[in-house]
Image (cartoon, rainbow, N blue to C red):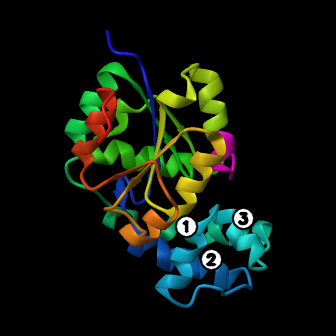
Amino acid sequence: MKERSLFLFDFDGVLADSLEIYAEAVARCLERSGTPIVKTREDYLSLFDGNLYESMAARGVNLADYSRAAKEIMPGIGYHAIKPFTGLIPVLVALSRDHSLLVISSNGSKTIRKMLIRFGFDPYFEEILGADFSVSKKDKIDYALEKYGIPAQRTFYIGDTAGDIKEARAAGVRSVAVTWGWHTRERLLAAQPEFLVDRPEDLLRMGSGLQP
């Protein structure tokens, strides 16, 4: 019998192809909150070199003002235009047979749930821990470890940014960087993930106890 592992998936950039939508939306929220720090695509991506909310606060953003702006702007963005990355359904089906799958994201849980349902991904995830649970991914990983009782060495956080890798490392779990998301391969490698994968099916090797 396979040992059960915990697979913690980031949402945007790992499951959902959403960069264009959110880069524009976050820029609008920051402008509305009086701190227009995102002028270029690189300005936006640099917020994810660490924890998103810590990065914004370090650049002078009042997070309460940002949250108020987001409540006004985010409901009106083009969620219908956000698509899932291809090749994920067979991987999620296979992993969920023997392992626990969760979403841990800086996005909101209700928004994620709606998109998981639309993508056909919802049946494979046991729980969603979004920004409404905590803005710290490390805290959410810590919670998942305690709740599910699976050792850190069998827990994988799957992300697409340098910040994801850093928060996985801070929580003591195994960091997995995917190259189909928001940060480039070079930027991910600089953050020193434990694993770097180019295709969703590479995740199945970890589910089998093998290195990808």
Name the residue: 39% across, 16% down.
Answer: 3
Tell me if mark 2 has few (under 14), some (14-19) or many (20+) residues whose alpha carbon lies within 10 angstroms of its own: many
Which residue lies under the disc numbered 3? 54
Q: Is residue 139 magenta?
A: yes
Asked if labels 2 and 3 touch by Cβ distance under 8 angstroms, the answer is no
The three-letter code of the residue at mark 1 reads Met
Residue 69: x percent and y percent?
Answer: 68, 72
- Does label 1 or label 2 sit earlier along the sequence? 2
Q: Is residue 11 above or below residue 45?
A: above
Q: Residue furthest top?
A: 1
Task: Please give left or right for residue 90 compared with residue 208 in the image.
Answer: left
Tell me if mark 3 has few (under 14), some (14-19) or many (20+) residues whose alpha carbon lies within 10 angstroms of its own: some
Quadrant placement of the C terminus: top left
The three-letter code of the residue at mark 3 reads Glu
Asked if labels 2 and 1 touch by Cβ distance under 8 angstroms, the answer is yes
Which residue lies under the disc numbered 1? 74
Name the residue: 33% across, 20% down.
Answer: 98
Magenta segment range?
134-140
Numbered mark located on residue 29 in the image: 2
Residue 56: x percent and y percent?
Answer: 70, 72
Q: Is residue 162 magenta?
A: no
Q: Is residue 83 above or below residue 9?
A: below
Asked if labels 3 and 1 touch by Cβ distance under 8 angstroms, the answer is no
Name the residue: 56% across, 83% down.
Answer: 43
